[in-house]
Image (spheres, rainbow, N blue to C red):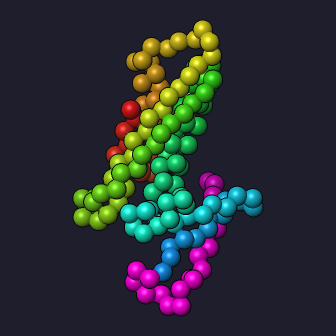
Amino acid sequence: MSELSIRLHWQRSAPDLKPGKFSNAHVVQFGDRHSLPVDAAPDWGGDASNTNPEQALASALSSCHMMTFLALAAKAGWPVASYEDHAVAHLGKNPRGQMSVTRIDLHPVVRFDTGFTVDAQKLAEMQDRAHRYCFVANSLADSVEITIL
């Protein structure tokens, strides 16, 4: 099976590592060319201009769902012209009372080539199949509710 990796780098900028007195800002490197500034979510003191892990999780799910949907649509002969999503990660307490991402909502909008239509029921069925086959969704299946709106 595949092994997929990232590199993460954090450097303390404060004189000491004291609770509430240090920055969580760090860099995540994907491959040799792409680096992403990451921080805690703004509610937890992070810089809102940086990505946070919860957004990255929503992004991973949204991307995986889209790629799975596109693969299924291609096999079905559906001429998808564009695909957009607005994924929202919701924080809350899990059944053990721990803070976690408890739900991720996906809001995919699929557009097809001019002249091609598919009814809402068939589109919903294809979205459901994409969800069932998405690697990331399957990884989260037991702990995060995923809603496709």
Q: Is residue 88 above or below residue 13?
A: above
Q: Is residue 68 above or below residue 11?
A: above
Quarter of the image holding residue 107? Answer: top left
Residue 69: percent from the left, percent from the top? 54, 31
Q: Is residue 104 above or below residue 16?
A: above
Tell me where residue 52 appears, x and y as whole percent.
50, 60
Q: Residue at x 70, y 58 (%)?
A: 34
Q: Main secondary structure of the magenta part?
A: loop
| Nearer to the camera, 125 or 8 | 8
Magenta-span inclusion, residue 17 = yes
Q: Which residues are magenta?
A: 1-21
Residue 124 located within the stretch drawn in magenta: no
User: Can residue 116 be seen in this snapshot?
Assistant: yes
User: Where the C terminus falls, by quadrant?
Assistant: top left
Does any portion of residue 75 appear in the rendered image?
Answer: no
Residue projecting furthest to the right: 32
Identity of the residue drawn at 47% across and 67% down: 46
Task: Report the quarter where the N terminus lies.
Answer: bottom right
Above or below 19: residue 48: above
Horizontal and vertical percent position of residue 92: 30, 57
Q: Residue at x 60, y 27 (%)?
A: 82
Residue at image location 57% in from the left, 30% down from the top: 83
Quarter-of-image position of residue 11? bottom right
